[in-house]
Amino acid sequence: MSIVSVIKVDRYDTALLERAVDEHFDRLGLSGEIKPDMKVLIKPNLLSARKPECVATTHPEVVLAIIKKLRSLGVASVTVADSPGGPYLSANLSSVYSACGYKRLEEYAALNHSTGSGKVRNEAGRVVKEFDIIDPIREADYIINVAKLKTHSLTGMSGGIKNMFGAIPGLVKPEMHYRFPAIGGFSEMLLDLCETLRPNVTFIDAVIGMEGEGPNMGTPKDCGYFLASRDVYAQDEVAAGIIGIPADKVEMIRLAKERGLFDPGETVLVGDSIECMNFSLPQTDDDSYLSGIPSFMRGTVGFFAKRFLKPVPAVSKKSCVGCGKCAESCPQHIIEIKNRKAVIIKKSDCISCFCCQEMCPAHSITVKRRLRR
């Protein structure tokens, strides 16, 4: 049986979130297994240096409520750690903590500034048997995964499974995109990563989610949900229902079922009921792409688009600031900065991972469709 605890929380209010965390801990029986001498690691989504109201990152009030619960249980060692996009450097971490509103959490927990990493093996991995993992996660006794509910240009959605990708340091992440350019292989890798690290519990901040061009450039979506579960796979299936994506359309959830990592028939929702919030989907989604097409033409256009048109990034030179974040994050190394503007120099080599769009701070990268080769 996989219990997914669901609590409606309509705003980032300290008292509301603290009560919700207490309830989640009680429903999942977490208090009895967390010991004062454990090294507890909280892994939020700190994708980039964005303010909390941009909803690209886990809200600091959610993390603070969890930290306070751990402190009430006598836990002495609580660390908050993630590897944001870009180089895994202390200066980058400090910038992200400051922008995301996490600096004030230092009063209650340690914010990781170490940039070390090491290998963690899992011989049962299907496509990856060894991962490079940042030290605070690798060395933790207990991992609390705190995701943000968002749409995602590559994986369809970002929840608990995708959030663990931040355990891989900095620019090693684009290397994983290079190794696994297709969504199937990339999703298999994410499952291997989750099975290697096995977070003890996952919370999903869906108080306000992100719709549209997630995970970094979308828009806020009021949802009013706060989820918790020991089963990250069953919980993501529930979260997909909030977004309004059929779970089988999300490759990492479909493959998790295929692998037998969870059984949907064993999922038990405890607490409040779930409603579909009908998120707008990214431009990379076929259904989103067809939404502007007259209904009588969608069958024909959809057939053509899926077989012959490939979604690729396109740079708006008007708004591009030439910061180089897109070039830095491109696993294919096909983006250059010329005359202070980003240029995709070999579009035929693009693998449509959309790391460039994800990391662009100026919202200068959109999705176009071009003929497949």
Image (cartoon, grey):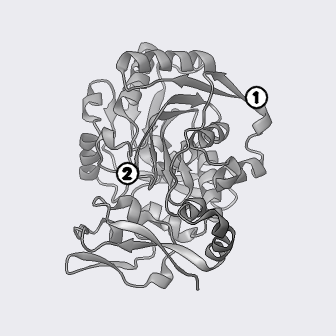
Placement of 324 over or under 107, stated as above or below: below
Q: Nearer the viewer, residue 46 or 373?
A: 373
Q: Residues within 10 Å of mark 1 (few under 14, many from 20)?
A: few
Residue located at (46% from left, 60% from top): 173
Residue located at (59% from left, 57% from top): 130
Q: Secondary structure at mark 1?
A: loop
Name the amino acid, label 1. Answer: Met
Q: Does residue 92 appear to the left or right of 173 in the view shown?
A: left
Q: Does residue 80 appear to the left or right of 236 in the view shown?
A: left
In what quadrant of the picture does the N terminus appear? top right
* Residue occupied by mark 2: 84
* Residue occupied by mark 1: 1
Q: Position of residue 80 (x, y in %)?
A: 38, 36
Q: Secondary structure at mark 2?
A: loop
The quarter of the displayed image where residue 313 is located: bottom left
Q: Position of residue 30 (x, y in %)?
A: 58, 20
Does the rendering let one see residue 254? yes
Give the farthest residue toward the left. 339
Q: Nearer the viewer, residue 303 or 161?
A: 303
Q: Position of residue 189 (x, y in %)?
A: 61, 58
Q: Residues within 10 Å of mark 2 (few under 14, many from 20)?
A: many
For marks 2 and 1 on the same chain, the one whose residue lies earlier in the sequence = 1
Q: Does residue 60 appear to the left or right of 29 in the view shown?
A: left
Placement of 351 over or under 121, stated as above or below: below
Name the amino acid, label 2. Answer: Pro
Placement of 242 over or under 254, stated as above or below: above
